[in-house]
Amino acid sequence: MEERGMSREEIESLLHEKKRKDIAYDKILSSMCTYPHEIAAYAHRMFLESNLGDPGLFPGTKEMEDEAIRMIGALLGNEHAYGYISTGGTESNIQAIHAIRNRKRREGLKDMNIIVPETAHFSFDKIADILSIEVRKAALDEELRMDVNSLEELIDDKTICVVGIAGTTEFGQIDPIKKISEIALEKNIFLHVDAAFGGFVIPFLDEKYEFDFSLDGVSSISIDPHKMGMSTIPAGCILFREESYLNELAVSTPYLTTKEQCSLIGTRSGASAVATFSVLKYLGREGLREIVGECMRLTRMLVRGARKIGISPVIEPVMNLVTLSVEEVEKVANALEGKGWRVSVTRVPKALRLVIMPHVKEETVKKFLEDLKDVV
């Protein structure tokens, strides 16, 4: 920091210079984030200073967060779910495991483990480190979903939680949550569903999937409004079926306007919570359904176009995420990057990974297919 500050004009010039270095979403096919809806951006700017870490000072903001939780809970089969707007899927996943870990620790259990599929998000590797819990990884079936036979083999008397994924990060698959729920109920194990990406997609697909609180075995769900919910970053959400699990996370806050706090972070953006409230109110289920419908239309268009040039998907896309089987996939990805595209590569099996978010338009897909044909 210099002794003397810069002028407003100099700062604005510097910001524009740095902004030009960022990649616009227009040719990004690797990210599960997108441009926020204009109403979300408007609401975010209006509530920049609001802090939900001290909600008694911002009762209007808190009312909107509570309403956002009710709306998201209703979308996921339980309008009476308990939770809060988090910073994203990582925090939400941490807090779900944190809650059940705290309960089991109070009951005297030690050396605990949780079971996730091999396709689980890397946030569960962070959870293993932060919470000192063993994370066991169940094998996948031929559709790249959690293999329930592998799951049952891994469960023992130290297993405190099973995690099912509703929209895997790499392949967009939905684990057999209904069967996992039955196993969780039978063995009295906490079931967390990571629907960070799929939570705002699956309810609006033509094919119906059981994955949420409508299943009795589901104990908690993570879902990210800043992905397909069109909110601003950072906006995740953690929901629990029972308030008692949220209470497992409570810590005393003696000098704030409330007696306790359940969130992982202290100072918490009210702006992104209000942005989430606003965009859900503005779009409603009809608007969200239209967004998902268009993303799925373009997903099918991309798959058809890829097949015409001899490239098949690893699996038929369930959601707006496509994985294409191409030879020398890293070479292809690098060549596409040379044409300005940003794509990613899956681990096993290796494939070109493309996420069709709301910023992707029909012309984007056509141009990408032209460049893909040229590259391969």
Image (tube, grey):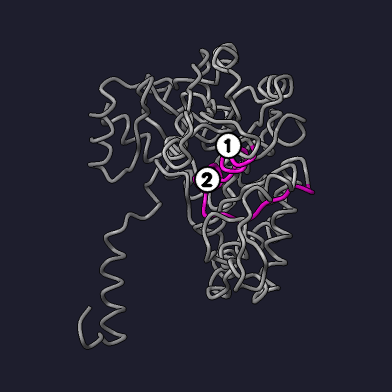
Question: Which residue corresponds to the image point at 58% horizontal and 38% vertical from the top-left?
Answer: 101
Q: Is residue 147 left or right of residue 128?
A: right
Residue extending furthest left? 2
Region in magenta: 79-103
Q: According to the image, label 1 marks what residue? A: 194
Question: Which residue corresponds to the image point at 23% horizontal and 29% vertical from the top-left?
Answer: 331
Q: In this view, does 51 lie above or below 72?
A: below
Under circle 1, the secondary element is strand
Towards the viewer: 34 or 170: 170
Q: Is residue 58 left or right of residue 138?
A: right
Q: Residues within 10 Å of mark 2 (few under 14, many from 20)?
A: many
Q: Is residue 292 above or below residue 1?
A: above
The percent coordinates of residue 170 (x first, y second) are 44, 31
Q: Specify the amino acid type for callout 2.
A: Gly
Q: According to the image, label 2 marks what residue? A: 89
Q: Is residue 132 left or right of residue 351?
A: right
- Quarter of the view holding residue 345: top left
Under circle 2, the secondary element is helix
Q: How far apart are marks 1 and 2 (CA)?
A: 8 Å
| In magenta stretch: residue 344 | no
The percent coordinates of residue 290 (x first, y second) are 65, 46
The percent coordinates of residue 92 (x first, y second) are 56, 46
Q: Is residue 284 above or below residue 163?
A: below
Towards the viewer: 236 or 162: 162
Circle on res. 206: none
- Quarter of the view holding residue 342: top left
The percent coordinates of residue 302 (x first, y second) are 46, 32
Q: N-terminal of the two: label 1 or label 2?
A: 2
Q: Specify the amino acid type for callout 1.
A: Asp
Does the rendering let one see residue 291? yes
Q: Are marks 1 and 2 in contact (CB under 8 Å)?
A: yes
